[in-house]
Amino acid sequence: MTVTRACACGKAILLGEHAVVYGHPAIAVPIPARTAVVEVWDAAPGTGIVIVAHDLNRRYRTGCLPVDQDGRFMLAAVGGVLQEVCPGRECPDLEVGVRSTIPIARGLGSGAAVSAAIARGIAAHLGITIPQDQLSDLVFATECLLHGTPSGIDNTVVCCETAVWFQRGQEPEAMTVDRPMLLVIGDTGVPSRTSESVARVRRRWESEPAAVGPLLDGIGELVAQGRSAIAEGDLPALGRAMDHNQELLQQLGVSSPELDRLIGAAREAGALGAKLSGGGMGGCMVGLVAPHGADRMEAALRAAGAHDTIVSQVEPSV
Ligand code: PMV
């Protein structure tokens, strides 16, 4: 029996979440330490496609409705990839096992990674490679089911797997990274619903445009500063942009006491900068750490109540 394996990694947003929804740029990086992995093999004729979601202890099958939200987005990934790789042909008979080490609903791109891994795995099993931009569009469609109106940053970084400069409506750009960026992520353990935090910002933006507009503009400016800092290898400047970005996110109302506690602990332990990452109101924070500082940072975050910590390094571009 041939088993085809495929994977996709998680992501973190270094600068610009929320403002990116309003057309400002954002910077996101892949987190290869956490992945969604799929295994695909042929199933008995007439099976259709069965997804075995090991972490959720559930099975979903094409043609069987209704399913829950997790099943709907995974089956949407299946539908999307079949449309790309065998349009108009009969559904193949496959079993698709899905496992992920990316925590769900923590702003680390778990949904996008699972969709991308499913699509890559099915396409590869059928002997086809999906071009990156098509894969990203397909994952974006599944993100719409989960989040309503995503900006497109998650699918972009998960599919291109490099540090990326993203702005809605423009071609994403792989970023110039001058020196390694060591990151430590702290998970509050509190689920973060991106659609809720995006809706919260939207309500404030509609009711107080004069207050919220400048916050979003300010975030956009920090992202531009962050880009130069990353290109020049000026990690202290990047850290300062992250700290300032966190202040503006707090003012937008998307931080939380748990995030503030972890961010404070990271700074006390010597982080060059720290902020929430993703939708906020729970989920994860990310700290930029000086070389060799990861162990101390992880210990500080755990002592401050982090549910989990992840160390990840963004390598320089060649
Ligand atoms: O999916 P999350 O929680 O990483 O959030 C993505 C970042 C937001 O800017 C809050 C939403 C979006 O679609 O860009």
Image (cartoon, grey):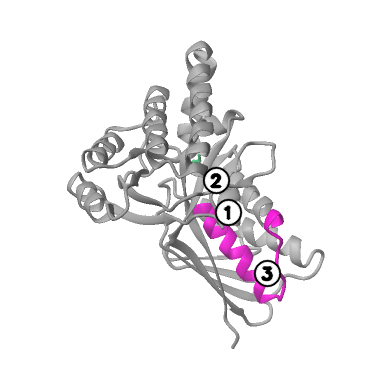
- The crowding category of the residue bearing disc 1, from other C-alpha atoms within 10 Å (few below 14, some 14 to 19, many at least 20), is many
Q: Main secondary structure of the magenta part?
A: helix
273 left or right of 216?
left
In the image, residue 263 lies in the stretch drawn in magenta: no
- At a point 42% along the width and 30% down the height, the residue shown is 245
Q: Position of residue 286 (x, y in %)?
A: 36, 44
Q: Secondary structure at mark 1?
A: helix
Residue 85 screen position, x and y as percent: 75, 66
Instruction: Report the amino acid beneath label 3.
Output: Ala
Name the residue at 68% across, 50% down. Answer: 137
Residue located beneath label 3 in the image: 123
Report the span colored magenta. Answer: 110-134
Q: Could you say which quadrant of the image residue 172 lies in?
A: top right
Q: Amino acid at mark 2?
A: Leu
- Can you identify the residue that label 1 sits on? 73
Q: Residue furthest top?
A: 210
Q: Are marks 1 and 2 in contact (CB under 8 Å)?
A: yes
Within the image, what quadrant is residue 46 found in? bottom right
Marked residue nearer the N-terminal end (3 or 2): 3
In this rendering, the label closer to the viewer, 1 or 3 = 3
